[in-house]
C-alpha cells in the first residue's frame, strides 16, 4: 500500500474519533450557562484555527462552490498562528517559551464561510474552534465574550487531543492553520502558512482544575469507538506512526 493510500485508510477511523471528541464537548458542556444562540455570530471571525483532519470533515459537509470560495480567500500572514497547542505544551515542558504571536493590526474580519443569513452553512461539520467559542456574557451586540477559566482549560485539552488525532493520520491532515489555507491543503492545493501537528505531550492544568479536568478527560478517553475506548486509539496512533517510521 502506498503511503497516500495508507493515510486515506487511516482517515476514516480518525474522522470517527474526531466526531467523538466533538460529541464529548457537547456532553461535557451541557448545563453551562451560555449566552450563545442561533444567529449569534460575533465569534465567527477570520481567525478560525483547525487541523487538516477537521478540514476533511468540514469538506465532507460543504457545497463545492463554498469550498472553492473558501480556499481562494487570501489570508494575511500577520494573523497566522505561530505554534500549535501540542507544540506549545512541549516547549513549556522543556522550559522554553513558544514563539510570540504577532499582534494583528485592526479588528478581526468575518469568517469567509458565514452566510448572508447570519448562519454557518456547515454547522454540523464545523471545527472544534467554533464549538468551544462560547460565552457566559451576551456579546452579539458588542463587548467581549467571557468564559469560565475551566472552560478554557477543557477546550485546550480537547484541542491537544484533536491535534494528536490529526498527527496520527499524517499527510495534509496533520497540518494546522487558518480555515482558507487548511481547506486549500485538504483540497490538494499548496497550503500556505501551515504548521505541523504534533502528538500529545501531556495535558497541563492548573492545580485548581486538575481533578475536574481529569474527570472530564476520563469520560472522553472511555468513549467507545469501533469497540475500543478512545484512549486506546490515542496510543494506537503512536504505535502506527512508530511502525511507519
Ligand atoms: S466555520 Fe461556521 S461556525 Fe465557524 S466561524 Fe465560520 S461561520 Fe462561524
Image (cartoon, rainbow, N blue to C red):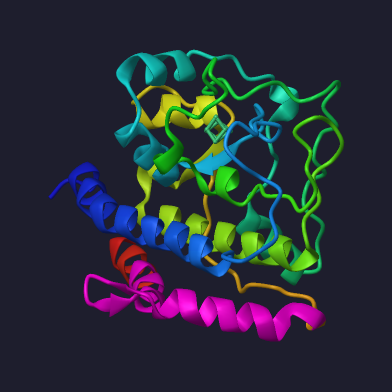
Quadrant that contains the C terminus: bottom left
Q: Can residue 194 be seen in this view?
A: no
Quick check: 49 left or right of 100?
A: left
Between residue 18 and residue 125, name the one nearer to us.
125
Between residue 64 and residue 73, name the one nearer to us.
64
Quadrant field for ligand 1: top right
Relative to 171, does residue 114 appear above or below in the rendering? Answer: above
Q: Position of residue 160 (x, y in %)?
A: 57, 61
On whether residue 210 falls in the magenta region, the answer is yes
What residue range appears in magenta? 208-237
Q: Where is residue 17 in the image (x, y as percent from the top left)?
A: 35, 61
Between residue 218 and residue 94, name the one nearer to us.
218
**Residue beneath the point at 52% across and 19% down:** 115
Q: Is residue 124 visible?
A: yes
**Which of the 4 image quarters holds residue 214?**
bottom right
Quick check: 41 left or right of 191?
A: right
**Residue beneath the point at 63% across and 60% down:** 155
Kindly give the residue lying farthest to the left in the view shown: 1
Q: Where is residue 74 in the image (x, y as percent from the top left)?
A: 59, 14
Amino acid at each position: 500500500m502506498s503511503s497516500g493510500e495508507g493515510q486515506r485508510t487511516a482517515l476514516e477511523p480518525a474522522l470517527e474519533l474526531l466526531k467523538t471528541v466533538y460529541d464529548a464537548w457537547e456532553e461535557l458542556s451541557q448545563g453551562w450557562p451560555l449566552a450563545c444562540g442561533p444567529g449569534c455570530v460575533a465569534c465567527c471571525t477570520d481567525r478560525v484555527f483547525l487541523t487538516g483532519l477537521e478540514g476533511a470533515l468540514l469538506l465532507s459537509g460543504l457545497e463545492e462552490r463554498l469550498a472553492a470560495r473558501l480556499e481562494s480567500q487570501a489570508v494575511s500572514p500577520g494573523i497566522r498562528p505561530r505554534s500549535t497547542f501540542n507544540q506549545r505544551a512541549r516547549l513549556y515542558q522543556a522550559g522554553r517559551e513558544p514563539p510570540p504571536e504577532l499582534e494583528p493590526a485592526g479588528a478581526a474580519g468575518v469568517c469567509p464561510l458565514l452566510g448572508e443569513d447570519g448562519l454557518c452553512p456547515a454547522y454540523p461539520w464545523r471545527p472544534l474552534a467554533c464549538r468551544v467559542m462560547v460565552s457566559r456574557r451576551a456579546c452579539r451586540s458588542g463587548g467581549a465574550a467571557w468564559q469560565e477559566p475551566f472552560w478554557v482549560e477543557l477546550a485546550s485539552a480537547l484541542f491537544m487531543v484533536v491535534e494528536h488525532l490529526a498527527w496520527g493520520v499524517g499527510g495534509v491532515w496533520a497540518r494546522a492553520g487558518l480555515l482558507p489555507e487548511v481547506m486549500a491543503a485538504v483540497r490538494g492545493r499548496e497550503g500556505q502558512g501551515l504548521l505541523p501537528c504534533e502528538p500529545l505531550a501531556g495535558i497541563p492544568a492548573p492545580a485548581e482544575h486538575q481533578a475536574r479536568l481529569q474527570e472530564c478527560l476520563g469520560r472522553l478517553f472511555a468513549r467507545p469507538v469501533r469497540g475500543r475506548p478512545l484512549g486506546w486509539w490515542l496510543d494506537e496512533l503512536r504505535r502506527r506512526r512508530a511502525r511507519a517510521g
